[in-house]
Amino acid sequence: MEAKKTLDSIKRNIESHVGECVTLRANTGRKRITVNNGVIEQTYPSIFIVRLDDDTQRKVTYSYSDVLTKTVQILFT
């Protein structure tokens, strides 16, 4: 059985992967899911920033509660 995750454990896990490539699967509502590849750039007390690997070099931010509620799924590659 998977251990119960808390916001603090999610934050520590993401902080340990700063600078690594990730695949993000985000639920954008109304049965739409976006899949993006990027690099975790920075972490802050309540959010983290991911720089996407597309041509525009845009950045997206997500909160740790998004990961906890499974609105965003992170796959470390």
Image: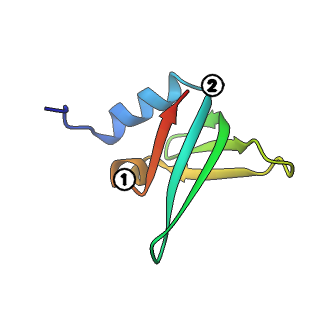
In the image, residue 27 sits, relative to residue 70, either above or below, namely below
The colour scheme applied to this rendered structure is: rainbow
In the image, residue 9 sits, relative to residue 44, either above or below, namely above
Q: How far apart are marks 1 and 2 (CA)?
A: 20 Å
> Which one is in front, 1 or 68?
1
Instruction: Find numbered disc 1 in the image and state the secondary structure of the residue it sits on.
Output: loop
Nearer the N terminus, badge 1 or badge 2?
Answer: 2
Instruction: Find numbered disc 2 in the image and state the secondary structure of the residue it sits on.
Output: loop
Q: Name the residue under label 2.
A: 20
Please tell me which residue is depicted at 19% across the width and 31% down the height of the picture: 3
User: Furthest residue to the left?
Assistant: 1
Q: Mark 1 points at which residue?
A: 70
Give the x, y percent position of residue 52: 72, 45
Give the x, y percent position of residue 61: 61, 51
Amino acid type for the residue under numbered disc 1: Lys
> Which one is in front, 43 or 40?
40
Asked whether the residues under the numbered discs 1 and 2 touch, taking CB atoms below 8 Å apart as contact, a structural biologist would say: no
Q: For the C terminus, which image quadrant?
A: top right
Give the x, y percent position of residue 72: 46, 52
Image-quadrant location for residue 21: top right
User: Furthest residue to the right?
Assistant: 55
Q: Residue 4 carries which label?
A: none
User: Furthest residue to the bottom?
Assistant: 30
Image-quadrant location for residue 17: top right
Amino acid type for the residue under numbered disc 2: Glu
In the image, residue 10 sits, relative to residue 12, either above or below, namely below
Local packing at callout 1 (Cα closer than 10 Å; few below 14, some 14-19, many 20+) is few
Please tell me which residue is depicted at 13% across the width and 32% down the height of the picture: 1
In the rendered structure, the answer to whether residue 33 lies left or right of residue 10 reads right
Local packing at callout 2 (Cα closer than 10 Å; few below 14, some 14-19, many 20+) is some
In the image, residue 43 sits, relative to residue 29, either above or below, namely above
Give the x, y percent position of residue 15: 52, 27
